[in-house]
Amino acid sequence: MHVDQLAAEMVDREAIRHVMMRYARAIDRIDEDLLRSVYWPDATDNHGNYNGPVKGFIEWVIPGLGAMDQTMHMLGNIHIEIHGSAAAVESYFHAYHRMVRDDGSRFDAVIAGRYVDRMEKRDGEWRIARRELAYDWYREYPDSGDWQSNIFDVPIRSNRYPDDVSYEISRDARERGDAKSS
């Protein structure tokens, strides 16, 4: 492979990984605009409980996530096969969900699986065109998070869009970076 081809492929691979990282952040922060930015408008998503156009997936998943106390999605191996302007991408994940039952009791659900995506590059941008979720395992545990116990003195807790500290840091970096480059 020529050096220029290799460099272009490395840029594409990083852009694809960035799509996956934005997806995890969008889900955990319940950031609907960020979530929309990882899919093409005509994309489809098969999450098992939902299978159809991405517009419907977003309408389904955002309220579902909002009903949970917390979530955290961790990405592992990301296998990328680039075929011109399309790519087959298989991303391993662990997803942690702190959930509430109808009776008000809480429990933790841990899911592991793989996002199996066909991504497409359109006008120089990679996004998900088709997603299939492959569930590898699921475990449910009695509520294990007790923030009331004060075992740890936690000054900053995870939060959702726009109140999570990550948005504040992002704004701060953008403002400082823009000010220094003027």
Image (tube, grey):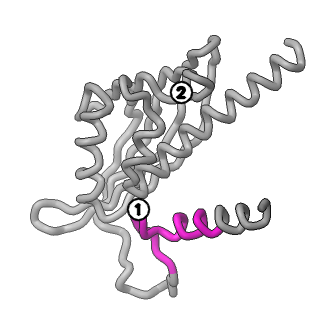
| Residue that protrudes farthest toward the left in the picture | 103
- For the C terminus, the quadrant is bottom right
Which of the labelled discs sits on residue 161, or is there none? 1
Q: Residue at x 53, y 20 (%)?
A: 120
Characterize the local packing of mark 2: few (<14), some (14-19) or many (20 or more) Cα atoms within 10 angstroms: many
Closer to viewer: mark 2 or mark 1: 1
> Which residues, given as a range, are shown in magenta?
156-172
Q: Which residue is mark 2?
A: 90
Q: Report the side of 168 relative to 99 (left or right).
A: right
Q: Is 43 placed left or right of 114 in the picture?
A: left
Residue for point 88% across, 13% down? 2
Tag 2: amino acid: Glu
Query: Front-most of 170 and 99?
Result: 170
Quadrant (top left, top right, bottom left, bottom right) of the N terminus: top right
Q: Residue at x 34, y 28 (%)?
A: 45
Location of residue 3 in the rendering, given as x and y in whole percent from the top left corner: 89, 19
Q: Amino acid at mark 1?
A: Tyr
Q: Position of residue 75 (x, y in %)?
A: 55, 44
Secondary structure under the numbered disc 1 in the rendered image: loop
- Above or below, 14 against 4 in this view is below
Kindly check if marks 2 and 1 are in contact, taking CB atoms under 8 A apart as contact.
no
Q: State which quadrant residue 103 falls in.
A: bottom left
Residue 60 magenta-highlighted = no
Q: Is residue 121 left or right of residue 128?
A: right
N-terminal label among 2 and 1: 2
Work out whether 88 lies above or below 152.
Answer: above
Q: Is residue 142 above or below residue 123?
A: below
Left or right of 49 on screen, residue 150: right
Q: Secondary structure at mark 2?
A: strand
- Residue 175, how many percent across, how many down? 65, 66
